[in-house]
Amino acid sequence: MRGGRWRRVASQVGRSVTVWAVSTVTMLVLAGILPDFQLQSADGDSATSIAITAATGAGAFGLLSAIFWPLLVRLLLLVPALVLGLLVFFLNGSLLIVALRLVPSGDSEAAPETAVIVAAVMSAVASATGAALAVRDDDAYRRRLYRLADRRRRALPPGPSSPGTVFVQLDGVGHDVLLDAVGKGLMPTVARWLGEGDEYGTGHDPRPTHRLTPWRTDWSSQTGASQLGILHGSNHDIPAFRWYEKAGREVMVCNRPTSAAELQRRAIDRTGDGGLLTADGASRGNLFSGGADEQALVLSIATKRRSRENRSRAGYFAYFSDPANAVRTALSFVAEVGREIGQSTRARVRKVRPRVSRGGLYPFVRAFATVVERDVVVAAVMGDMLAGRTSVYADLVAYDEVAHHSGPCSRDAEKVLERLDRALALIENVAEHAPRPYRIVVLSDHGQSPGETFRARYGLGLGDLVRAGCGLPVPRRARRTHSGAEARAAVRAALRRPVEEGGEEHRPSRRSSEPLVLASGNLGLVSFPDVPHRMTKEEIDARHPALLATLANHPGVGFLLVRSEAHGGLVLGAYGAEIPLDQLDGDPGPLEVFGPGAADAVRRTHSFPNAADIMVNSAYDPADGGEVLAFEEQIGSHGGLGGAQGKPFLLSPLAFSAPVDDGQALAGAEQVHRVLRRWLRESNGPQVPLEAEPEERAA
């Protein structure tokens, strides 16, 4: 025992000395390259003196970073995430200037801007050196993991023996995309869980530890509807990502903080339950809280006045308290921006089709989603596990953001899947060091369907087509509908700029007789704000006789849903097809191509009080690569019916009961919620209130 302790001490000292030596050499090299950075006096010094100065400066810099950096980060936890990332460089530079002033010779100096560069390079080199030396040192790795949540662990009692559960949501990753990535060797961790580890030379037990189950989304196949149903047990009356509510005369948007807070309140009122995570839970990077006590980067609390309850920064301190980690994330952010600019330029030069604009702020949004958000959320999950929390739900939006603009099966998106698999591996490794056993569940909220945009295919947007059908003037230049990807909301929340969409469409005038057209992927919603109720087909025909026929017969439209005085609800298709909702099982008409479950999804949405006057789903052709036509500027889209967007996955440990019985389909986010509740009960629960199921209280 004592010999092992001394070996660990010697190993740690050896690594520290090696890192110090590498930092010294790095400082000497930078002094020779950068004109505004010097380690000698103007009269010149001997090589020995310069080396001693460099060694002393590197040591002082490392010591100052170890002592003062955690304190600085703690003071800066109130600073928005992106701003903190930028301050990393300047704070490191300041520490270097102080370190040089402490050198006994007094001859070292660096310009402030040069100090920033030198400090960033030295931190990155020191981090890489330390990581390389500790690759095979399990004790060092264990100590590093424990340091991530040491402060929180000391404040909590010892963890229980019952297993905790970690739910990791891979936003937008479809069931078939996951299987394809496993088959290509892009996700070895998932492959090993499914019992295919030996195929990739991992040396792990080839027996599976998890089962993979596909599930079917509701008609609104997007994060707002799916995650609210998964976390809170109800996504009733969420017809799309964006919709107009006539009672309140307001456009609701799932990734607008005020809308997210209201939707969460409605779900809690409907179910009478706080959510999946009410008992010692943590919510990380989600649109909704799930009733968790610990929350970080949760959109539904972004507009609340900051307090101890909603100002959680778990993960920020754990990650940024290490200056090397902070610099590495900042450098990775810059590298990701450059990678996106290079990839989009290559696609434009090669005239890749389909393609959407990827300029403006998008490179920074992508870098935030694929680097900053991922690092912070994963670090928060690690901290929760090391603190012994009972249940954790975290959303990683990286794939969804890239797939929207590069395509769900693109090489860009595949690279993101590789990095997400490494994040899962890290979470799995942390579970080995947690104070209680953990079961890891991985799931997605929807998939993504490929295809060019409606505007690119036909030269006009859905709004222009609606105006033409109403006999209104159509602008010569088609108006683009901005993407509604979740990463943008995460960026705004991090910057504390919560307003997502405003302008004229936020609260349209009730006096306006012009139609309001909103897009949610390949699902479009047409509303008439001046009519206080949901219009019927007869009323629409009386006002605009050509509108419904124009839409239903357009080649880019799959079907329409409207209310009818005679039949209650009608599905309209090309060539005059009109099928009442209660007859869809025998005659699906235009819904047949959308597969099983489409009729049930349409009937359910028709029952929503806030369903639009006209619900429009784009065309879908399974024989054409499963493509849909997005009404937004996305070449990988989701939000409606058609293709892979409606087939996400649920990857669960075999220790849990099967999600559904053999031969049954797992359909709808609310059913997924019930499955997750059951699994929490199986983990020596109950972890959530059991007095009644949400659907029973709603009834």
Image (cartoon, rainbow, N blue to C red):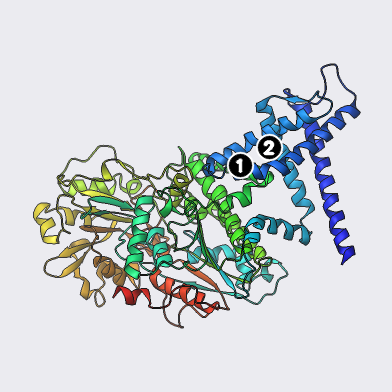
Question: Neighbour class for label 1 at 10 Å: few (<14), some, many (≥20)?
Answer: many
Give the vertical position of 40 relative to 452 (above or below). above
- Residue indicated by mark 2: 120
Place of residue 600 in the rendered image (x, y in percent of width and height, measured from the top left): 30, 72
Place of residue 243 in the rendered image (x, y in percent of width and height, measured from the top left): 28, 54
Question: Neighbour class for label 2 at 10 Å: few (<14), some, many (≥20)?
Answer: many
Q: Give SS at disc 2.
A: helix
The answer to whether residue 677 is visible is yes
Q: Locate residue 432 relative to residue 445 in the image: left or right.
A: right
Q: Earlier in the sequence, mark 2 or mark 1?
A: 2
Q: Locate residue 320 relative to residue 536 in the image: left or right.
A: right
Q: Nearer the viewer, residue 412 or 374?
A: 374
Q: Nearer the viewer, residue 581 or 303?
A: 303
* Mark number displayed over residue 25: none
* Residues at circles 2 and 1 in contact by the CB criterion of under 8 Å: yes
Query: Label 1 amino acid?
Result: Ala
**Residue located at (39% from left, 63% from top):** 228
- Residue indicated by mark 1: 330
Give the vertical position of 554 relative to 125 (above or below). below
Q: Report which quarter residue 672 is drawn in.
A: bottom left
Q: Report which quarter residue 520 is drawn in.
A: bottom left
**Residue located at (82% from left, 23% from top):** 40
Place of residue 347 in the rendered image (x, y in percent of width and height, measured from the top left): 50, 43
**Residue located at (85% from left, 16% from top):** 43
Query: Label 2 amino acid?
Result: Ala
